[in-house]
Every structure is written in C-alpha cells, then in structure tokens.
Image (cartoon, rainbow, N blue to C red):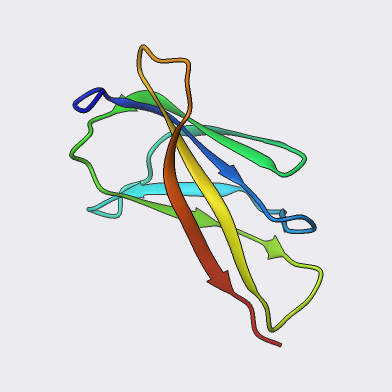
Amino acid sequence: MQGKPLAELMINLPEGVKINKGIEVKNQSGQKIPTTVSINGQKTTVAFSQPINPEMKLSIFMKGVNTPRYSEIWQYQVYAKKVGFTQEIPLGTAQIQTYP
C-alpha cells in the first residue's frame, strides 16, 4: 500500500464541532491544492482533484471551526484513502485546544 498516491482524507469531528468556512489544503511551498470538500454530519471528506504524491507534505486548514464550549481539548480521527483502494486507512488522532 505504501507508495500509492493519496486520493482523499477523511476527518471525523467530535460531537458538536462544526467547520463553517471550509477546509483549505496547501503543499510544503504554501501553494493551495485543489480539493472538493464535503461535510456530512461529523464526517468531513477532502477529495483531491489530482492524486497526491506520497512524499508530499500537506497542511490542512480548517476554517471557521465552532465548538460548543471553550477551554477544551478536542480530538478527531484522520483517515486516508489511497488511489486504487476502497478501504480507509487510519492515520491517527489530531488534537486542537480552544480558549475563551
């Protein structure tokens, strides 16, 4: 499975957390990567217009994140889908902290 290009990223948001202004993806040079973002409840899918080379480093910017409470640590799971595969591959858990 290694070496296959990346087709999609999936982010499972914690209950009550919402993304109101979309998601932007940039490469290591700061150039925006064309994507299609869909949000269905707590599951967000970022589909890349062109498959992403496995060596490329990406930055994911979630814009307009709203949470039901401040002063919390929010954890969400991130998955990938590689070209030619239907199964989601768990990448790990990301964490953000909000402040009042």
Depth check, front residue: 32 or 44: 44
Residue located 65% across and 85% down the image: 99
Above or below: residue 88 compared with residue 42: above
Residue 65 drawn above or below residue 19: below
Instruction: Give the left or right position of residue 59, taking residue 87 as reference.
Output: left
Residue for point 66% across, 61% down? 64
Left or right, 28 with reference to 33: left
x, y percent for residue 53: 23, 31
Residue 72 picture location, percent across and down: 67, 78
| Number of numbered discs visible in the structure rendering | 0
In the image as oriented, which residue stretches furthest toward the bottom? 100
Q: Report the residue at 72% width, 44% height from top.
A: 42
Residue 31 at x, y = what percent?
31, 48
Answer left or right for 40 relative to 90: right
- Check the picture and name the quadrant holding the C terminus: bottom right
Q: Quadrant of residue 85?
A: top left
